[in-house]
Amino acid sequence: MSKRDRFKSVPMPKQPPHERIRNFNEVALGYTEEQALMEAERCLQCAEPQCVKGCPVEIDIPAFIKLLREGKFREAIMKIKEKNSLPAVCGRVCPQEDQCQKDCVLGKKGDPVQIGRLERFLADWEREHGVELPEKKPYTGKRVAVIGSGPAGLTLAGDLAKLGHEVVVFEALHEPGGVLMYGIPEFRLPKSIVQAEIEYIKKLGITIKTDTLIGRLYTIPELLNEEGFDAVFIGTGAGPPIFMGIPGENLSGIYSANEFLIRVNLMRSYLFPKWDTPIKVGDKVAVIGAGNVAMDAARCSLRLGAKEVHIVYRRSRAEMPARKEEIENAEEEGVLFDILTLPVAYYGDEKGWVRKIECIKMQLSEPDETGRRRPVPIPGSNFMMDIDTVIVAIGRRPNPLIQQTTPGLKVNEDGTIVVDENMRTSIEGVYAGGDIVTGEATVISAMGAGRKAAKSIHEYLMKRKK
Amino acid sequence: MYKIIEKRELAPGIKLIKVLAPEIAKKAKAGQFVILRVDKTGERIPLTLADWDQKEGTITLVFLEVGVSTKKLGRLNKDDVILNLLGPLGNPTEVKDYGSVCVVGGGVGIAAAYPIARALKEAGNKIVSIIGARSANLLIFEDEMKEYSDEIYISTDDGTKGYKGFVSDLLKDLLVKGYKFDMVYAVGPALMMRAVADVTRPYKIKTIVSLNPIMVDGMGMCGACRVIVGGKTRFTCVDGPEFDAHEVDFTELVRRQRAFIEEEKKALEIFERGELL
Ligand SMILES: Cc1cc2nc3c(=O)[nH]c(=O)nc-3n(C[C@H](O)[C@H](O)[C@H](O)COP(=O)(O)OP(=O)(O)OC[C@H]3O[C@@H](n4cnc5c(N)ncnc54)[C@H](O)[C@@H]3O)c2cc1C
Ligand SMILES: Cc1cc2nc3c(=O)[nH]c(=O)nc-3n(C[C@H](O)[C@H](O)[C@H](O)COP(=O)(O)OP(=O)(O)OC[C@H]3O[C@@H](n4cnc5c(N)ncnc54)[C@H](O)[C@@H]3O)c2cc1C
Ligand code: SF4
Ligand code: FES
């Protein structure tokens, strides 16, 4: 081991690109025990660890790596779980390169410690070796309603159940998990892993009611005043897809990324006709946008048989918001990148199916007062692209139903819910967190918000005389 | 899991089921719909609430068997269960006393028009209803509609019952004869709703239609149900399903309804051969 170059990380085995674009199985295969130990060995156990500062939930990273190194896998995963309730998920989907791994001292001269891969290794180890249920506090007699079963809602539900409260999670869709279930594809986050995390939280004694749209079936005032809940947490996340509003955008064959990914992931369209929900992907696909959602849509398209998939993005490569690893994966799989390109119109055939996009080339302006270089169109640079499927992945707005049906709930102009530093909304006993508060963000920040809100709700419930 | 407690065939290919769903029954209002999934591999399909009973805790759905999902649903019997049921969805009908309202129902849409007619009648309106089907044996909900109509007119495409022609032709006849309506409600196939809109436009009668585009989630998250109304893109499941008929781009609605037609046909063939069960 000591012969290894300390500045080089242990690579993680992956399915080779030519194979993986023909299946929906997980791309990254995870470290073996030997590989994990080797990678853990690289950590310098810094006295002032920069990695912890970069972690949104401040996991004691050197401590868990030390335990891993000593072969104490159970203790190591428990160390992570002190702060992170969804390590198998976060180990797979967190943007570590912008968080914990960003300022790892080893990164200055070489590769940072692959903290995410180690986290994933431990979480997978635990799942295979049996998860230990934590102790539960005695029943407090308090009831909490949680709206939405994404990472924010699930984390909060688990935390409050451990503290002895009765928790009911209401989820509108037919499967719990939020984006983890309906958005992020199987090949990046296997649904069996999400389901295992949910089973674990259920074992803590919480009830999940699917097929329940709050705002329509019950409003928040009804939950508090008629259904006997002492507090409510809103974790409804982002939903309505944003379209560009350009001509031809409603042609058939133009999907929002949300529609496309819901069909593929939640409805398992890739198994059509064995599963009933259809999807149609042509030979040439254009995905508009370059975030995680766009990469996921592009890579799903390949797996559904597209011959050519383009990411069409109006800025340059450096500004792409997707995780670096996912951009690399997409590129390896053959996704093409049309940068500095903006769609301006779509044209269809006689059946109303999209056939062409008109685009305009862009250039980056001089940095403005915020230092950001804006993309501006180059006059006369319009050109046509033949395509037969478009996926629009330029963002989503906060789900609006709760805001519309809860009198007195303070909402920002962009539709997100206003909370204070303790995740309290403008209504007593009502809390919120996750994408519904921040706008589209990350799994770990939603989880962190759930954690914080759980603490705050617990204090509120214990202070309150019923 | 939601249990079917009653099942009837109303006409060839048109079935009625009563489903135990007390929470939905308690909140249901005219004009709203549900989304259901028959089984684990099922599609999410929207169906309008044709009736509900708070005391009994049931909702009633009436559907035409057109493809795999509705045929699967049609094969279920009393005491079988539906795996998922989400509702009530969509904005309820704006019920108030408009004066004289004409309620037009076409095909299976008559069942969806029924709660609207009832609510409007109970709000004090005079109800003239026009119901129609391709042929006499396909006409459903005649008695139910009669109960809440001051006058009722019937049409069939082939003339086997009532007026020979479309409901929109019959409506036009009434208008030519001098009938005055303060409002027209139309529920049925997209082309029928368009025809009604075309009839009422020159008379400047406010006309509301209940649209039926393809849906997936039914809660505003996917945009599959987007339609153009008054030049703007709207999501039918959350902004509708009822819209001003004179503002709707029906050409696009019909086009988008047919987006997956080849896949649906293929799936249906496989299903009918019994290979999907
Ligand atoms: C395709 C895609 C890929 C992504 N990739 C990554 C990634 O790699 N890394 C990363 O960190 N982040 C990623 N994200 C972002 C991340 O998934 C989200 O930030 C996170 O899931 C937000 O969690 P949440 O709990 O706030 O809400 P969500 O996960 O959005 O869950 C909200 C839940 O609430 C339900 N709901 C909404 N309204 C109601 C209502 N009225 N009643 C009942 N239920 C309701 C919804 O159905 C949903 O299940 C990705 C997002 C998408 C869409
Ligand atoms: C708000 C709303 C209320 C409706 N109410 C009723 C009702 O009360 N009774 C009734 O018989 N039908 C109703 N429909 C239509 C019904 O949902 C479709 O007939 C059904 O989904 C068809 O599914 P299928 O698999 O049997 O047929 P498919 O083979 O999938 O399709 C046959 C046709 O049905 C339409 N369709 C397919 N999938 C969907 C979908 N997910 N959503 C909507 N339309 C689709 C398409 O136009 C297609 O051409 C309603 C639709 C909407 C949007
Ligand atoms: S910064 Fe890097 S080397 Fe230092 S403790 Fe954290 S992971 Fe280990
Ligand atoms: S059905 Fe998805 S937004 Fe309406």
Image (cartoon, grey):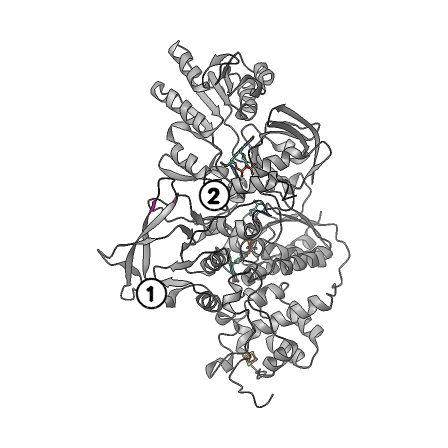
Mark 2: give few (<14), some (14-19) or many (20+) Cα within 10 Å.
many
Q: Is residue A4 visible?
A: yes
Residue lying farthest left? A380
Residue A350 in magenta?
yes
Q: Is residue A215 visible?
A: no
Give the x, y percent position of residue B52: 64, 28
Q: Residue at position x 74%, y 63% from top?
A: A133
- A98 is higher (above) or lower (below) than B216: below
**In the image, which residues are magenta?**
A346-353
Residue A169 in magenta?
no
- A439 is higher (above) or lower (below) than A38: above
Chain hosting mark 2? B
Q: Quadrant of the N terminus of chain A?
A: bottom right
Q: Residue at position x 42%, y 35% from top?
A: B253
- Image quadrant assignment for residue A394: bottom left
Give the x, y percent position of residue B191: 43, 28
Which residue is disc 1 drawn over?
A372
